[in-house]
Amino acid sequence: MTTNKKSALGRGLSAILQSPETDITSKDISGEFVVGAIAEIPINQIEANPFQPRTDFEEQTLHELAESIKVQGIIQPITVRKLGYDKYQLISGERRLRAAKMVGLEKIPAYIRIADDEQMLEMALIENIHRDDLNPIEIALSYQRLIDEIGISPNDLAEKVGKNRSSVVNYLRLLKLPPEVQVAVRDGQISMGHARAIINIEDVEDQLTILKEIIEKGLSVRDVEQWVRDIKEASRQPEAESITIEEKGSKEKPELPETLASARDQLAQKFGTKVDISRTAKGKGQIIIKFRNEADFQRIMALLQ
């Protein structure tokens, strides 16, 4: 009785590799397979890609891919560049390569091409940018590496990756956020919409306070955007009130000493709402923090704590 052992390649790919029209057996002085070929390359001859922009590979999805490879084989070849005699370096397909190692494959189908370091980086980054499972921080870092290491402008980058310029710039702005916020975006604790709202606040402490509230209370992007508007509005109000009083020549409200006026402005900025400070001639006074509704009150109480 004859048993048919299932190939580790895909059925369609096996047919391609066995086709006499595909040059996978040509040899030259630099190794067994020539550039431009699709070949089954020993996995131990393939080096990792030093330009790989991905830092996180989820174990669960890798195991799922490994199981798929065990049943279906490698459907899509990885891409490598030739370094020398039977020596290759991965350009793209790291998840496939890792999963193939997990199931114990000794060889993997690969498309061999020529690429210098700059092209390696560019191809690896652009391939990863278009992955659905790449998080916003990984995309932002990939964009920044293309700009820094290849020396292209955001406009050229947008054209190269097929995105509009504003989208590219929005990703790049994420890298200006505090590390704690970037980690929260990376780990999916907050969305890119949350991060884009937070970045409009200049004070780092305020940014971290908002981050904490988002995570603990599940604030929506709209909630955060309103919070940011309140903070910005509050920071402008004291100046506007001062001008109004001067213009009207009002004597109803005595001018606060500079130290108290500065404290009032800081509190308004901190709480994202209007703050009043009054003081008698003897030095006794009060601080009034205004709120619009119950939710706003709870927000201010969280800041006080």
Image (spheres, rainbow, N blue to C red):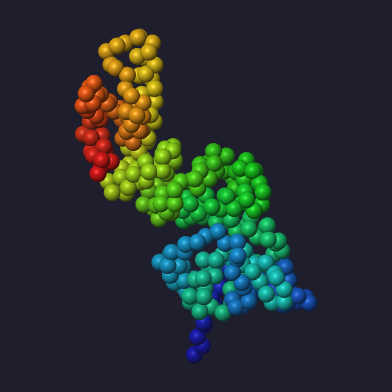
Q: Position of residue 64 (x, y in %)?
A: 43, 68
The residue at the point 48 percent across, 75 percent down is 102
Residue 220 image-quadrant placement: top left
Q: Is residue 292 among what the camera can see?
A: no
- Placement of 271 over or under 117, stated as above or below: above
> Which residue lies most toward the bottom here?
1
Residue 12 image-quadrant placement: bottom right
Residue 269 or residue 41, whichever sits in front: 269
- Placement of 146 over or under 66, stated as above or below: above
Residue 266 or residue 256, whichever sits in front: 256
The residue at the point 36 percent across, 24 percent down is 238
Residue 34 or residue 12, whichever sits in front: 34
The residue at the point 60 percent across, 78 percent down is 44
- Placement of 275 over or under 28, stated as above or below: above
> Which residue lies most toward the right here?
29
Q: Is residue 67 among what the camera can see?
A: yes
The residue at the point 68 percent across, 57 percent down is 118
- Placement of 289 over or under 161, stated as above or below: above
Q: Position of residue 302 (x, y in %)?
A: 25, 42
Q: Position of residue 91 (x, y in %)?
A: 62, 64
